[in-house]
Amino acid sequence: MTTTSTRTTGSIHSALPVERLTTDDDLFVRMEHALGLGVVNQCVWQLPTRLDEDAFSRLGERLCAGRASRLVARRPPPARDAWRYTPTAGSVEFFTETVRAENIAAWVDAQAQFALNSVSGPSWRLSAAHSDGIGTYVSFTAAHAIGDGATLITAIVEALSGTAYNTDVAMPDLVSDLSDGAGTAARAARAAASSVVATLRDASPRGSARPQPSRAPSPSPAPTGAIATTSAGRAAGTEAGIPPSVIVTVDREEALRVAAERNGTLNSLFVGLMVGIVDKAGLASSGDVVPVSIPVSQHREDDRRANATTGVTAHIRLDSNRYTDLSEIRDACKAAYRTLDARPGSMAAMSTVAQALGDRAVRRLAGGMSTPLCVASNVGRVNPLFASFGTDRPGVTAMRAVTTDTAGLAGHAGGISGWLCTGDEVLTLAVSSLNPSRINDRDSLRALIAAEFASWKLTETDWGICE
């Protein structure tokens, strides 16, 4: 995936730059507008204090003037789409009704289902409600095209700290579009040629064969965010809405102890939990190798890119020994990270080609693509200001990415995705189904998670039930 700057020179008539979308940004615009399979990133907080509504409103105003408050200006292909910043891109609401702890999962899901649109807006939404105790629940959602997890955290931190963000960019004119279109077409042509080479390279034998999961068709190992098509149709009885999702917390010191006793780290324990849920869901069986897609942020300091996350794939063999020794999973993750500097593969090349095409052509190009079997996104240690949401005490935070149309996922042989956030005292794990035909309700997913935590002798608690 590209790591080049999105900020380019405008026409000779404008002193301001035109800010074009990267291929990573374009990927999520096409999922949303060409394939009807939009992805929403969501950050949630359980704050132990009663958030002041006026302070919340002022924060919303600062977000409206910040990096996340932008929309996509579609341009005629092969010119790349451009960003336009506007204070009307977002939605801010503080609910008057309190939320009971037993209803928090439904409230969080309802916020994720709020209609977002990266082109026409609103592209993001900030909402909050007091709990029936002394705390406050907060949700921040954004169309994935607007920003990946790192970008959204940065946007919130900037708004909380009052850090200004330069939103002065020019809208492209005909001269700018013609110039950019020529460059985009040339890159697409080179990528199309290199994809043939990459495909042949990826198909070459690389040591011992890796058996694939036997209980369900496995998607090709791909970085998170890989284009998934809706051409396979919708499964009978599948309803629209977000897929089943569960958020749990676990004591950080307990998790560190369990990982250390098994020669592992929090990250390898996280990956072990995720492949264990895949196993217990019947999406793979003992001896199979599960391709785990691991997102890796490539954001730089002062980075203006909305999405700068690439993916590596760790190949994890399902072996019950993982419950006593995490060494094999840890080694597999290290091997995956070493591929970050490898030449771009066919997926990156296809994304470059897709950016030069119209939505109709992208729909044809995406035919047959599949969703990952297992995604394990480790957010890492949460920024203290972000965790406190500007209050005097840190809250319990969680992040997740959800597809806004369950029916659109049907038929793609996907599995599950998980996001891990590390706080001072607890870890939060958000798990979502990518396969609504196999994991189609929250209770079933919750039971799978409980069974997997029990296998590690770890105690998990539903997020949001503690003050």
Image: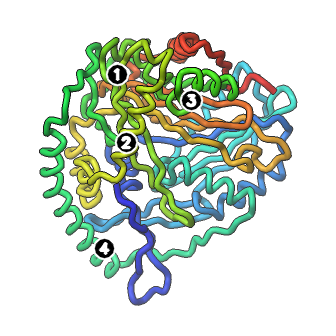
- Give the image quarter of residue 133: top right
Q: Are marks 4 and 2 in contact (CB under 8 Å)?
A: no
The answer to whether any part of residue 175 appears in the image is yes
Closer to the N terminus: mark 2 or mark 3? 2
The kind of secondary structure element at disc 4 is helix
- Mark 3, residue position: 430
Residue corresponding to mark 1: 317
Residue 144 in the image, given as x and y percentages of width and height: 48, 47
Ranked by sequence position, the earlier of labels 4 and 2 is 4
The amino acid type of the residue labelled 3 equals Ala
Q: What's the CA distance linking mark 1 and mark 2?
A: 16 Å
Q: CA distance from mark 3 to mark 4?
A: 40 Å
Q: Nearer the viewer, mark 2 or mark 3?
A: 2
**Amino acid found under the numbered disc labelled 4:** Asp
Report the side of 217 relative to 41 (left or right): left
Disc nearer the start of the sequence (1/3)? 1
Task: Between label 1 and label 3, give the one nearer the viewer.
Answer: 1
In the rendered image, which residue does mark 2 sit on?
A: 312
Which residue is at the front of the view, 178 or 163? 163
- The N terminus is located in which quarter? bottom left
